[in-house]
Amino acid sequence: MFNNIRVEISFKDFEQLKKKLDFCLNKNIYKLNIPCKGNIKKDFLVEVVKFIGVKYKHLDVIYHYSFYHQFHKNNSLSYQMFLEFLELNKLYNRGNEILLVSGSKKRDQFDVLSILENLKLDISKKFKFGVAFNPYSFNDIDCTIERSRLIDKLNSYFVQSIWLQSGSEINQLSKEINFLNKIIVNSKQSIDKDIHLYGSLFIPSKQFLARFKFRPWKGVYLSNKYLNSLEESEKITKNILDFYLKNNIIPLVETELSTEKQFANAQNFFDL
């Protein structure tokens, strides 16, 4: 099962990074995502790319690039640093796609859409990126904006993959996947037909539910039914996982998997 998913890892320093990478390798987990948040940004993110590219070059790593966290003084300098990161990724990570995110607070003229527009003048369309999409926008206005932004991103022709935000409402997820399939299949030549879909997934636990209820994450919608019962959250998550697999959506596990107990819990969950 773990051969068909991706796993996200977070860390505070190189010692913790090495420990988690070695653990993943020991469990035959080779497809990893590294977020751009907390300590993992700017100079440290650059050094991480070099470190993994030299010492763990056989791993399949997708880096996230947050234009909020990667801002340097002004838009011009920040954009130049982004171009340098692309070259770094080509050199140390075989030019794997990068997941672009605007961040929790969009910066004026320095978000995913504005960057994709600027890139048309700077690099070949051979370079591909991933972009985020939240299928759980229940407000009609928010849903329209989210869909419109995604279409604009796809029309750049730089997009190779769409990464779905996590949530608990499978009916809403199904509705938006139908929308995605329609715009990709019926698109004009500007949209790449061979787009991969990834779906975020959290393995529920009492600790996760308690933390989320105390401090909800922006953009992540989990129903009261999900949050108030571990049994219900496991059932809902398993249904979403089944939906992902039936619709060729590759799961991205964002739950921490760096100890034997966490790995065992994940195995038990996928075997439900």
Image: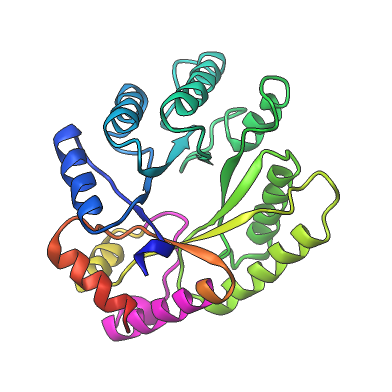
Residue at x 29% of width, y 67% of height: 213
Could you tell whether 263 is left or right of 44 in the image? left
Relative to 6, residue 207 above or below: below
Measured from the top left, where is residue 45 in percent x and y? Answer: 34, 29
Q: Residue furthest front?
A: 58
**Residue 260's spot in the image, x, y percent?**
13, 63
Q: Quadrant where the N terminus lies?
A: bottom left
Is residue 237 left or right of 84 when viewed as pictured? Answer: left
Kindly indicate the quadrant of the structure image that contains residue 144.
bottom right
236 on left or right of 134: left
Magenta region, main secondary structure: helix
Residue 18 vs residue 136, the one in the foreground: 18
Left or right: 203 with respect to 132? left
Give above or below for 205 relative to 103: below
Residue located at (50% from left, 38% from top): 96
In-front residue for pair 150/54: 54
Q: Quadrant location of residue 220? A: bottom left
Q: Is residue 207 visible?
A: no
* Location of residue 234 with respect to 19 vertically, above or below: below
Residue 160 percent across, percent down from the top left: 62, 46
Name the residue located 67 percent from the left edge and 19 percent from the top edge. 122
Quarter of the figure that contains the C terminus? bottom left
**Magenta segment range?**
217-244
